[in-house]
Amino acid sequence: MLFVAVSALSTSSPPRRWLQRQLCAAALSVCLQQPFPMMASTTSAVAARTAVEEVWDLLDQYYYDGEALSRSEWKAARQRLGDEAARTETPLRRATLQALHGDRYTRLLDKRAYEEISRFDILGVGLILAPGDDEVARVVSPPIPGSSGAKADVRQDDVVESIDGVATKGRSSFDLLDVVTANDRPTVRLVLRRGDDRRTLDLARRVDVVDPVGRVDVSPDGVAYVRLREFNARAAPRLATVLADIRRRGATRLVLDLRGNPGGAFQAAVNAASLFLPPDSPAVTVLERRADQLFKTSSSPKTTTPSEGFRVELWLDSNSASASEIFAAALRDNCAAVVAGDRPSYGKGLIQAVFGLQDDAGGLVVTVAQYLTPKGNPIQGVGVKPDIPLPPTLYLAGPRKLPDKTDLDRDFASIAATCTPPPR
């Protein structure tokens, strides 16, 4: 599954500004929840109809397939289901999704499933931030239940003037993420403004829910094996630590095993790709209803990437999906890795945003965009095709022989000789 952490690289152009403000910002997987006005009446019938209207409005604003939303049956169903909900006092949200006849990824989450998504929260404090019209960051959705932001009574529409002493005005979503994740701090200091009131909060980060890295080994001849299990909020910083460790242990070749990796956060995949590619390398192109957007790797002033000097081979299988495919395609298209596997990856090239529902009933997952590899190739229904078959000696759970350094060099050389990276 791929949950969006869509962040534009700058605020200079209208399409990028729209994507920043409307989809998501400096947090990963739970995207923005726009405030929808509630009807004045407090009767259960009106509340039931409002529940249908809330889902409908979210889909009208963000669902990626404009053609599906323009069909007459979709519009007629809105009135019918709203009237039925008011009569039966039942929020017919699932029937609303069925009327869309959309993809299977657009669906409702119960409260427990919605809270579980918090492990993809890049900020780790349960807040979704995006630049406002004045280019100062704002909280654009109620905090994730149980997060440090929720416990501190942070509210939707609170203005975030600074993060860890860095003013947010004029900063892109990538900039906001870099401030928080640069040193893997256990806390985040926010200066918040609500009306005329200003306060400073130190919020504990929750970023260690699931360790994304599995087994790590280094062979005597300098071949490292790393299993990456998912792309959550910890993926990029954890992987950076592993790269430094295996370098100290003498590794010069790296097998990064993504087999069975179901994906995770969009932003985590781009951040992880930044560890292997030069700054400003094209990572993925997002296609959505209103504007297309090219996302690039981090433009931080580093002179070398953490993986500098490694020859990298990625292992994929048919269960490597979504964010795994973004990551793999970014490295392969930029000639930074060879992809090995017995068959193409899963082929999920759609991006979902997760919206909290106003009545605290859970969340709504909406497909908001699809994506292409840096060279413009589709992923949806196709997957990432391997360059070479998997090595004959597979590394699974037990202590087995790692691939030979000579074999990896041969694999890498066979692809590098003909690979041309896309223009930056």
Image (spheres, grey):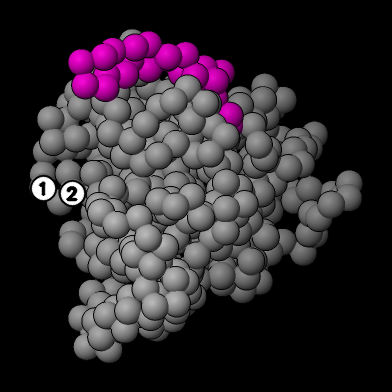
Residue at left offset 35%, top offset 55%: 42
Range of residues picked out in magenta:
184-207
Measured along the vertical axis of the image, is residue 423 above or below residue 341?
Answer: above
Dot 1 amino acid type: Pro
* 392 relative position to 13: left or right: right
Residue at left offset 80%, top offset 34%: 220
Label 1 secondary element: helix
Q: Is residue 274 visible?
A: no
Q: Nearer the viewer, residue 245 or 417?
A: 245
Decide whether residue 23 is among the magenta residues. Answer: no
Instruction: Count neighbours of disc 2 (C-alpha within 10 A) and say few if under 14, some if 14 to 19, many if 20 or more.
Output: some
Measured along the vertical axis of the image, is residue 111 above or below residue 376?
Answer: above
Label 2 secondary element: helix
Measured along the vertical axis of the image, is residue 61 above or below residue 162?
Answer: below
Residue at left offset 26%, top offset 22%: 194
Q: Is residue 198 visible?
A: yes
* 148 relative position to 197: left or right: right
Decide whether residue 201 is among the magenta residues. Answer: yes
Which residue is labeled 1 in the image?
A: 14
Dot 2 amino acid type: Trp
Mark 1 and mark 2 residues within 8 Å of each other at the beta carbon: yes
Residue 29 in percent (x, y) is at 46, 47
* 419 relative position to 415: left or right: left
Instruction: Count neighbours of disc 1 (C-alpha within 10 A) and say few if under 14, some if 14 to 19, many if 20 or more.
Output: few
Label annotation for residue 134: none
Which residue is labeled 2 in the image?
A: 18
Measured along the vertical axis of the image, is residue 180 above or below residue 255?
Answer: above
